[in-house]
Image (cartoon, grey):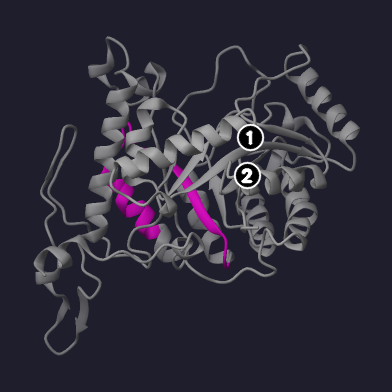
Amino acid sequence: MSTAYLGVELDAAGRHPAAWRQSDARPGELFTAGYWTELAQLADRAGLDFLAIPDSFAPPAEGQAGLVRGRLDAVAIAARVAPLTRTVGLVPTATVTHTEPFHLSKAIATLDFVSLGRAGWQPTVSHTLDEADLFGRKDWSDGPPPADTLWRELADAVEVVVRLWDSWEDDAVIRDRATGRYVDRDKLHYIDFAGEFFSVKGPSITPRSPQAHPPVVLRADEPDALAVVGRWAQVARIAAPDLAAASEARARVRDAVAAAGRDPDEVAVLLDVETLLADTADQAQATLAQLDGWHDGSGGTEHGTLRILGTPVTLADLIEEAVGAGAADGVTLVPLALPSGMHTVAEGLVPLLVQRGLRPSAPTPTTLRGRFGLERPANYFTEARA
């Protein structure tokens, strides 16, 4: 049996919109550093591969007074918890639509420095006019561009970011006291990128980071995303209602990677699994019914991927089956309620996975690329000169 990659998405009080009303929730702490640090350190001790920290430019939905309003910046959260954790990877979402890739390259490279090589990055796109209005996008006045245009823009943005990461060679910083030279200017490079959406000269103002290229994590749910996933992703996240659909989604990702001329085995495909765990399945069902009733009184909320309501054993069985059947290389767990969901994963699920040989008994300090079996990449400009 192969080991299973294991990540957890931390979204405020949990994915369920009414989770903040639970008695063990802490809504008054959602905008404090201590809340996020506590969850990250719990994941770190449990040996998780990474934490995904979602983010969005989308303004709060109108007419839904019961939602948690506001969110902290995902990259800033990751940078805050990075020095206080040891092994867990940190993968914030950073939207490329309306955002300059030069700034994103600096932010993720900085996170890689402060985490000592545990940074990742989940680029995503903005689809709505409400988000465009926040940036005064007059060119969107007739409506948002089609999805394929947004994903082509994302591909351009990722290429700019990666080139900027390479614009400093590893030994560019020399700190020569005798001559007063801090950098070797021959080892800084203009990227001179001119694409469909961006024209960027460079170089970056941030040196090449510990991983050089922090892993790019991309969602692979939209058809227009697949070509970008095939070219740029080191980790692909999929949503599926069952393992059969997950197998099909994983196959599509692997085909896209192969079509881009890359080895499909170098891209880990992780299935999103929403979780609400308790001592018994009945207790989990009762908790969900209460949350649904608080949210809209209709007795149900939509979910776009497989959901496990049950015990840690139920979830461990699902992960074992998914990896054994080739439906996924691991999972990204999405707790419906936090912080309780993180405690159950760390204290209930992980020991079971260790017993079954699906997780290592102790986390090994390494880079996030190392956790996914990826080598540190060579520098584009060094290879070009050679």
User: What is the secondary structure assignment of the residue under circle 2?
Assistant: loop
Relative vertical location of residue 209 with respect to residue 289 in this rendering, above or below: below
Relative vertical location of residue 223 with respect to residue 88 in this rendering, above or below: above
Relative vertical location of residue 375 with respect to residue 228 in this rendering, above or below: below
Of discs 1 and 2, which sits in the foreground?
2
Where does label 2 land, which residue?
325
Question: Label 2 neighbourhood size at 10 Å, few (<14), some (14-19), many (20+)?
Answer: few
At x 48%, y 59%, the residue is 372
At x 39%, y 22%, the residue is 127
User: Residue 107 in magenta?
Assistant: yes
Q: Quadrant of the C terminus?
A: bottom left
**Mark 1 and mark 2: Cα distance apart in space:** 9 Å
Would residue 101 appear left or right of 295 to someone viewing this image? left
User: What is the secondary structure assignment of the residue under circle 1?
Assistant: helix
Do we see residue 229 in this rendering? no
Residue 285 percent coordinates (x, y): 84, 28
Determine the image quadrant of residue 186: bottom left
At x 56%, y 49%, the residue is 329
Amino acid, disc 1: Leu
Would residue 185 appear left or right of 51 to someone viewing this image? left
Residue 20 percent coordinates (x, y): 73, 33
| Closer to the camera in the image, 69 or 83 | 83
User: Residue 36 in magenta?
Assistant: no
Residue furthest to the bottom: 178
Amino acid, disc 2: Ala
Q: Quadrant of the N terminus?
A: bottom right
Q: Which residues are magenta?
A: 86-110
Where does label 1 land, which residue?
243
Residue 259 percent coordinates (x, y): 30, 40
Evaluate if marks 1 and 2 touch, with contact meaning CB atoms under 8 Å apart: yes
Relative vertical location of residue 320 with respect to residue 125 in this rendering, above or below: below
